Amino acid sequence: MTIHEIQAEILRLKKEKNICILAHSYQGHEILEIADYTGDSYGLSVEATSADQDTVLMCGVRFMAETCKVLSPEKKVILASPDAGCPMADQMDRAMIEKVKIDYPNHAVVCYINTTSELKTVCDVCVTSSSAVQICNQLPQKDILFIPDQNLAQYVAEMLPEKNIKFLDGCCPYHALMTIEDVNHARKLYPNAQLLVHPECPPAVAKAADYVGSTTGIMQYAANSEHNEFIIGTETSIVEHMQFSYPDKHFYPLSGSLMCPEMKKTTLMDVYHCLKHNAGEEIVLSADVMEGAKRCIDEMIRLGG
């Protein structure tokens, strides 16, 4: 079968079986083309809540499928590639943070959306990369323990110097590879390009950027900008997607190292087999985890995230 034939069969099957396909922006373009919704992890989960279909297929990683299940408990949520995880989400667990909280009894515990649902149950509020500064600013506590991404935590601390933000040794291992040398090299190659980076990049890289924001924020910035050349400091799939979306503009990767192998585990054939042969893994969470994680996410929504 050709890619086009597989895509056509997927489109037929998802309509026949009444399945909604969600695809994170870091997925391959051939998957984005057959998805009902594309975007950041939290945004996809929100879209799923209003989808007419009662079954949702997540083309992404495990924590994203869990978030989708938490926000749509009545729906059947399937993870297209069962072994697709997030290295950052796996760096900290509930038991670890329960012990850490003993040393920070007066700190509000803020967790990034890139965490397991179980870990969210012992945190006060969840944030996304686009809402982290706003949510932390809204908290009445001056003292904040921000997990798991130290780079995002340092970015928030830079934006909110009046807060006392503590962080642990955690990060996205791929965004963290970016260096100021990469920035200098890219700017030398593309002197007229603006540098747009994700706050999961190290602080030195973020400070050198023309714009720092979420994946969706980066894409929106480039779409609305009068500039027509951009160096993209996030997962390299975004470069390809933006090249397709805005063919009159030019997009370059900050580094070829910024590629998430976990996201690449999901293939177009995985999606096909989920629809054709009921492959994938249904996400099942305990009532306690569902309740605790939803409380954490609901607090983010209450604070405007």
Image: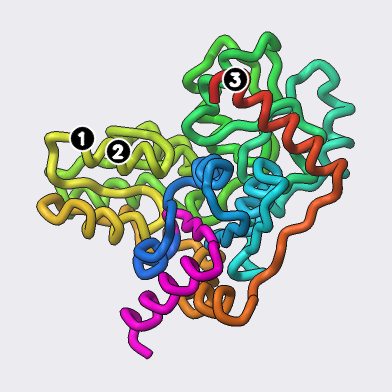
Hey, what amino acid is under mark 1?
Answer: Asn
Magenta residue span: 1-26
Q: Are marks 1 and 2 in contact (CB under 8 Å)?
A: yes
Measuring from the top left, give residue 201's x and y in whole percent: 46, 43
- Taking the spot 50% from the left edge, 77% from the top edge, the residue there is 272
- Out of 177 and 102, give the one closest to the viewer: 102
Which residue is denoted by mark 2 in the rendering? 220
* Mark 3 vs mark 1: in front: 1
| Horizontal side of residue 258 vs 266, given as left or right | left
Label 2, label 3: how many angstroms apart (C-alpha)? 23 Å
Measuring from the top left, give residue 76's x and y in whole percent: 68, 57
Which residue is denoted by mark 1 in the rendering? 224
| Horizontal side of residue 211 vs 166, given as left or right | left
**In the current view of this chain or complex, which residue is farthest to the front?**
16
Name the quadrant of the C terminus.
top right
Hey, what amino acid is under mark 3?
Answer: Cys
Q: Earlier in the sequence, mark 3 or mark 1?
A: 3
Which residue is denoted by mark 3 in the rendering? 136
Judged from the image, the secondary structure of the residue bearing numbered disc 1 is helix
Which scheme is used to colour this image of the protein? rainbow
Measuring from the top left, give residue 207's x and y in whole percent: 38, 32
Q: Are marks 3 and 1 in contact (CB under 8 Å)?
A: no
